Structures are given as structure tokens and as C-alpha cells.
Amino acid sequence: MKTFVLVISMWGFNGSEWVYMGNQFVNNNPMSKSQCEALIADDQWTRHIENEYYSIQFDCFEVDKKI
């Protein structure tokens, strides 16, 4: 079975495109893909976005692959 981790990364808008800012948080608890995707579902989070130039992104990465 493939295992996945939840990664939360920070992004910034430079006026023309979104770029990775170099900061991320990794949940080190391996889980199935469906479990990870359930954690990042829109209905699991309430968003409060006050700065249109910064954002965070939620992704599920396979543990065997480079994050």
C-alpha cells in the first residue's frame, strides 16, 4: 500500500504568478491517499484570507517520493 503525508506550503503572488516561498510544514504521520485527501477537503477548513498576495496550499505527497 502506498502511504502519503500531508504537506502545507506557503506561496506568494509576485504580480504575474504564484511562486513557492520556501516554507512548508509536513505532517509526519503516513496515511492512505484517501485519508490524506479527506484532511484537505474544503469542508474541513474555514479560511480567513486577508492578504491577496499570500496563500497556503495543502497537498498529499507519496512518502517514497521527494517532497
Image (cartoon, grey):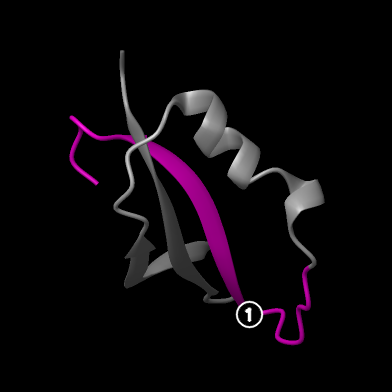
Toward which corner of the image does residue 46 lie, by quadrant? bottom right
Q: Position of residue 41 (x, y in %)?
A: 70, 43
The x, y position of residue 7, in whole percent, is: 41, 53
Task: Determine if residue 16 is in view.
Answer: no
Identify the residue under disc 1.
53
Q: Which residues are magenta?
A: 47-67
Please state which amino acid type lies under the numbered disc 1. Answer: Tyr
**Can residue 4 be seen at all in this image of the molecule?**
yes
* x then y, percent, for residue 13: 56, 73
Q: What residue sits 31% from the left and 13% below the top?
A: 1
**Image height of 40 relative to 10, above or below:** above
Q: Residue at x 49, y 69 (%)?
A: 11
Q: Residues within 10 Å of mark 1 (few under 14, many from 20)?
A: few
Is 39 magenta? The answer is no
On screen, residue 32 above or below 51: above
Indicate whether 56 appears above or below 26: below
- Which residue is more in the foreground, 58 or 30? 30
46 sits to left or right of 7: right
Percent x, y of residue 47: 77, 69
